Image: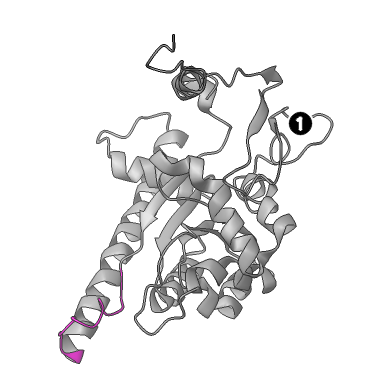
Amino acid sequence: MFGYTPEQMYAGAEAVIMNFPSTGRRGRFDRRSEEDFKKDSEKAIKNIDDIWDKVALYARIDSMAKVQNKIPEDYNPQMDALLPVYRGQKKLLVEVNKKEDILVAIKWLREKKIKAVLTGVSEGGRVTEEIKKSNYDVITGPVLSVPGRANAAYDEAYRNVSKMVEAGIRVAIRTNEAENVRNLPFNAGFAATYGLGIEEALRCITINPAQIFEVDKLYGSLEAGKIANLFISDGDPFEPKTRITHLFIRGWNVPLESRQTLLNDEFLERLPGINEE
């Protein structure tokens, strides 16, 4: 909203994204036999195990090359991207949603001793104890969604955040849609209504994500010495009818005029189409 280059958008956090393979059944139409189901699950885990073993080997080669002041001959983009994760320099954002997959992902991450954040986690409310024990943070959403199972309660997606927060898990809320980031307050608002509360909902879109990405020294709350990013509204920020009256980014008072506001003003002031004599 205020800047033109990637450098101006960069807040200081970097991470690598991983779609964790599903080891559960693919819904009620999944007709695989138990034997085939087990084979597919084992194959999926073996695949990521093999990748991680290659990263470990690549890390050793890279370390030896640096000691000898040499550059590895073969450039490998995949390995170079995962190398900071292997060394604990970056977090791995692991996209996982089903209850069974969450448990498998936690087990795999702990075995590999990976610094990670669980993302998606649409059924996190079903395994709060296991997530809490793992000490992994969670980025979940969208809250404005439908249940993932036919036998689930209608409000499972709405209450998912509150269940995890009640268990002591640090949670951030997302929309999971770049084009609908504008709807983030309303996702948080639904979570607030369904058990989370306004204060915790506000934390889930401010200080919690800042802490998860380790940029909370500069962002996430209104404190002396932090970057001055804030807004002023005429009501509850989680309500769709609320208007943002002022916006400050890095201390700059950002104009809120846009094509939409100009059109709104134009048609509010339009004259009748027929002149009365």
Residue at the front extreme of this rendering: 277
Residue at the top extreme of this rendering: 277
Look at the magenta stretch and give its main secondary structure: loop
Quadrant in the rendering for residue 65? top left
Which contiguous range is marked in magenta?
22-34
In this rendering, position of residue 35 left or right of residue 252: left
* Residue topped by disc 1: 226
Residue at the image position 63 percent from the left and 69 percent from the top: 162
Please tell me which residue lies in front, 258 or 16.
Answer: 258
| Residue 125: image location, x then y, percent | 54, 75
Residue at the image position 60 percent from the left and 79 percent from the top: 129
Q: Can you say whether 273 is above or below 120 in the image?
A: above
Crowding at dot 1, Cα within 10 Å, few <14 / some 14-19 / many 20+, comes out as some
| Residue 58: image location, x then y, percent | 35, 48
Please tell me which residue lies in front, 69 or 249.
Answer: 249
| Residue 26: image location, x then y, percent | 25, 76
Secondary structure under the numbered disc 1 in the rendered image: loop
Q: Is residue 27 magenta?
A: yes
In this rendering, position of residue 260 left or right of residue 130: left
Q: Can you say whether 216 is above or below 261 in the image?
A: below
| Residue 182: image location, x then y, percent | 50, 40
Quadrant in the rendering for residue 19? bottom left
Please tell me which residue lies in front, 69 or 189.
Answer: 189
